[in-house]
């Protein structure tokens, strides 16, 4: 007989084939009675809009030069000096 893994409890432990030895029923009941000292904090709508506006302002850093092995026209309109570096002049004319 295994005892409860809690240090101050001598009751019979619950055994699970998946999780092994678990606390006894009385310890589990005591755990459910505990109150959380802090409420959960969820992102407010205002915070989500602020984060999205920061992402929108920083969109230049997120664009990639190629999408599905084709030149990204949006990237090269933001960075026209890189057209010759990537050698995509002909491909951009076709788009």
Image (cartoon, rainbow, N blue to C red):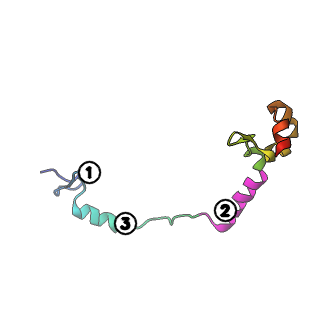
Front-lying residue, 35 or 50: 50
Q: Which image quarter: residue 41?
A: bottom right
Label 3 sits on residue: 34
Residue 20 lies within the magenta run? no
> How packed is label 3: few (under 14 Cα within 10 Å), some, or many (20 or more)?
few
Mark 1 highlights which residue? Answer: 18
Is there CB contact under 8 Å for labels 3 and 1?
Answer: no
User: With 68 as the anchor, is 74 left or right in this view?
Assistant: right
Rendered location of residue 74, percent (x, y)? 80, 48
Q: Which residue is mark 2?
A: 48
Q: Earlier in the sequence, mark 2 or mark 3?
A: 3
Farthest left residue in view: 1
Q: Nearer the viewer, residue 58 or 38?
A: 58
Residue 53 falls within the magenta-colored stretch: yes
Gap between marks 2 and 3 measured at Cα = 32 Å
Q: Earlier in the sequence, mark 1 or mark 2?
A: 1
Q: Estimate the spatial distance between the alpha carbons at disc 1 and disc 2, rounded to whole Å.
A: 39 Å
């Amino acid at each position: 007989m295994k005892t409860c893994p809690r240090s101050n409890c001598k009751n019979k432990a619950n055994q699970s084939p998946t999780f092994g030895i678990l606390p006894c029923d009385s310890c589990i009941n005591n755990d459910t009675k505990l109150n959380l000292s802090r409420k959960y904090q969820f992102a407010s709508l205002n915070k989500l809009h602020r984060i999205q506006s920061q992402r929108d302002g920083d969109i230049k850093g997120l664009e990639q030069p190629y999408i599905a092995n084709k030149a990204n026209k949006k990237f090269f309109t933001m960075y026209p000096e890189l057209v010759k570096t990537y050698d995509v002049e002909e491909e951009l004319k076709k788009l």
